[in-house]
Image: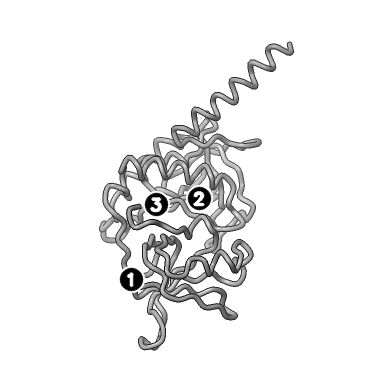
Amino acid sequence: MLIQKKRQALLALFLCLSSSSYGQCLAQGDLQVAQVQRIVDGDTLHLSDGRKVRLVGVNTPELDHENGRHEAFALEAKQRLSSLAGDQVYWQSAQESEDRYGRKLYYLFTKDRESIASQLLSDGLGYRIAVPPNIRYQDCFAKSEQIAREAKRGLWQHPTQWQPQAGFAVARSKLTSITHNRGGWWLETSQDLVINIPRYAEHYWSEKDIYFLQGKSVEARGWQYQRKNHRKDRFKSVVLTVKHPQDLRRIESSD
C-alpha cells in the first residue's frame, strides 16, 4: 500500500513537471463541472445554466461581432477555446468571483485538469494578465506565455506595437519621470503614455522598486484609456493602468 502511494505521488509530480515544461498548468484543488452552451470569443463563454464566464489570467484578441473586423488571431482563439472546452468544462471560482458586467470569473480546465488559459497562452492566442486579487496560477501562466514568445507563435510572430487607443494594450517604452500623488504612482514614458499604478494596488510594490525603474525601459500591460480635456503641455493623453508587478517589468533593449 505504501509503495503504491509513493508511485502515485511520483506520477503526480512527473505529470506536474512535464505539463509545466510544455506550458500546461494543472489544477490545484477540487474542480466543478458545467455544461457549455456557447463560446462567445477566446476568453468568454456561456454555460447552459445561464452563467456567463470570463476566463481569469488571459486576455484574447477582440472579435468585432458587428462589422467582422476582428483583431488578429481572434477567431483562432475562439476556435481553440471551443475545442478545449468541448461540451463541458471544469472550473474553479476566482477569489473575486464576478466582474462589473456580471460575468463569473473562473479558472477553466479540461477533463485532464489542464488549464485552458495556459494552453491559450502557450499557443500564442492571448496575453497573460494579472488582476488582483485573482492572481492564482500567475507564475505558471507567465511560463506558458514565455513559451509562445520564444517560439514566436500566434500574437508573438511580430513585435508588439503600442497604439494610443482605448482597450487592452502591451506597451514598451522608456520611463522618463516618476511621481506620486493621491491617484497613485504615475510613470511617464517617452511616448504619449503614462503608466498608472492606482492607490489600491500600491502595496504590491515598494517605493524603492518603483524609483529603480526611473530611466529604464519597461514592458507594461493592462487596460488603457484616453484622458478627457487634458493639457498636452503638461500631461500625456493616454493612461495605462497596471495592478500587479507581473504586468510591469524592466526589459533590456535586446528583449
Residue annotated with mark 1: 164
From the viewer's perspective, tell me whether residue 143 is left or right of residue 9: left
Residue 229 drawn above or below residue 254: below
Contact check, label 1 and label 2, Cβ < 8 Å: no
Q: Residue at x 38, y 60 (%)?
A: 170
Amino acid carrying label 3: it is: Thr
Q: Position of residue 246 (x, y in %)?
A: 51, 55
Residue annotated with mark 2: 57
From the viewer's perspective, tell me whether residue 53 is left or right of residue 133: left
Depth check: 51 or 16 in front?
16
Q: Position of residue 50 (x, y in %)?
A: 54, 49
Amino acid carrying label 2: it is: Gly
Q: Position of residue 240 (x, y in %)?
A: 44, 69
Separation of residues labelled 1 and 2 (CA atoms): 24 Å
Q: Which mark is residue 60?
A: 3
Depth check: 233 or 90 in front?
233
Q: Residue at x 44, y 49 (%)?
A: 43
Depth check: 168 or 64 in front?
168
